[in-house]
Image (cartoon, grey):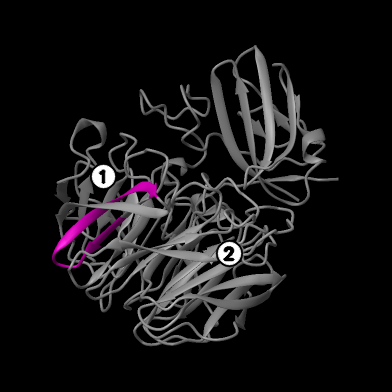
Amino acid sequence: MTSVKPVLALAKILTCCSLLLGITQSVRAAIPSFTEHLMGNTGETNQGQTTLVDVDLDGDLDWLMGTQNAGTYFWEFKGYTAGKANWVMHKIGDGGGCETSGVAMDITGDGYPDMIVGSKWWKNPGKSGNITGPWQVFTNNGVKVNCADAIIGDWNNDKKLDVAFVQRGQIAAWYETNPQGPWIEHIWPGIQIHSGLAAGDFNNDGFLDAVVDNILFLSKNKAGSAWDQVTLPYSARPTDGVIVEAGDVDGDGDMDLVQMGHWTTGPVSWVENVDGTGKVWANHVLPGNVGDLSHSVNIADIDNDGDMDLELGADGGASFWYEQTSPKVFKATSFTSRPTHDMRVGDVDRDGDLDMIGKPWGVGPHYFFQNMLVDNGGVKKDWSRGPIGSHNPTNWNRIQLNGCMDPKSSNYDPWALHSGPITQFCGTTTLIQPKTESTSGAFAGRFFSFPEQGPYSLTLRTLDGSLISSLNGQATDPIDLLPMYQKARPGIYFLAGQVNDRKTETRIIVK
């Protein structure tokens, strides 16, 4: 008998798309290969603060990045001409003052991603102004820490995204953002490092946790104000800090980690969350080392075969993607010798496979690494929902916890009216055993309630969009979902419903 467990924390939403991105293994007709495209050059040094996001909401991914003291840039992807990728660089403002790791999120609620770099943020003008720049810049007096690492999450469960920073010799803290005033600071105690941040719900209790350096902070309450600390068994931990990312590497339904030392040559490890409590960990050293001056970790299904692969970058020497050839077994393949400092992963051109972008820390060109998997006959996936990592939420506008914001009133409404495709995750499940009947909420475990009468449709899909099962009919209260769940193998899925013009969607875990 299957049962349904809810995804109750933004940690899940942030990292689940870095999880089982395809529940069943697919037979590939090709393997990834990468075509390098020169994007351009800022001509500036200390280049960091990178994120892949759809800046102009035209359906493809763009490149947001900045330099420490010179400029902040929106690189617009303009498709291909005769096989050559076209990128147009727009300067949107001056430098942010941080070394690396800016993040993009919608601070103002207008639907467009804004850019955050430490104590500064730039408002995306969207349709109301010149999106190619300059953007209006704001200073957050509440932010005391500079940033050499930054992530987003929802640590106080208020359905609004927060941002966290860490910087060498200073505090590590997360902040409640505010478009009209100072941001509220919450410090993780005892941390003074250069880098090493990741977010995830590591004990599946519904609260967002954080990894800071080699310490896992397990949240003890909904407000994110009290923490249990767990020391992680890293194989490489220079005094300068680490590079770390969270995701379900082994596909067992809990959050693991991949880490390496900051600005070193290795080793690289994936750190297994052994029993799903976040308190028992096993370190697994991966074969080979990343090139000199390591500075990028990504977790994503680069070959579209349904399990997690790893993408590791460095400022010098070779960069690698690690194919998970069988459960917990990895094979390293170099894809470039160009600098890939703060490399990010996403389906830039929306062709169904995952691309990468990298650049140097110092002066030098940016490169777009086009994944040729689908072009060469490989399996195509719908990556419009991801991948998502706490450093690189490529579909940031879908990140929402336990409901949707009505685009007109900004009020919480799990059945908000949407004129087009769903742009946010709506609704949530509650922990309901299969034989327990409940009709509360839009989603309630086995049973599903609609807000009004009319023709309905329900679909259960894998995270890559493959249809598992569907139901159609006239809305009654409740609809029994057990027949849909019984067609699914254990894993993470999208459950979507529509009645008349109302739509909603949530993630669930089938066990």
Q: Secondary structure at mark 1?
A: loop
Q: Which is nearer the eye, 228 or 142?
A: 142
Residue located beneath label 2 in the image: 32
Q: Which is nearer the eye, 25 or 504?
A: 25
Which residue is at 47% across, 27% downward? 413
Quick check: 471 above or below 463? above
Magenta residues? 64-81
User: In this rendering, would 76 be left or right of 211?
Assistant: left
Residue located beneath label 1 in the image: 178
* Residue at far front of view: 82
Residue 164: within the magenta? no
Q: Position of residue 149 (x, y in %)?
A: 34, 68
User: From where the camera sits, is residue 209 visible?
Assistant: no
Q: Amino acid at mark 1?
A: Asn
User: From where the camera sits, is residue 399 visible?
Assistant: yes
Q: Position of residue 241 (x, y in %)?
A: 37, 80
User: In this rendering, would 504 be left or right of 419?
Assistant: right
Magenta: main secondary structure equals: strand
Q: Estimate the spatial distance between the alpha carbons at disc 2 and disc 1, rounded to whole Å.
A: 42 Å
Q: Amino acid at mark 2?
A: Pro
Quadrant position of the N terminus in the picture: top right
Which residue is at 65% across, 12% downward? 454
Q: Which of the 4 quarters of the picture holds residue 226?
A: bottom left
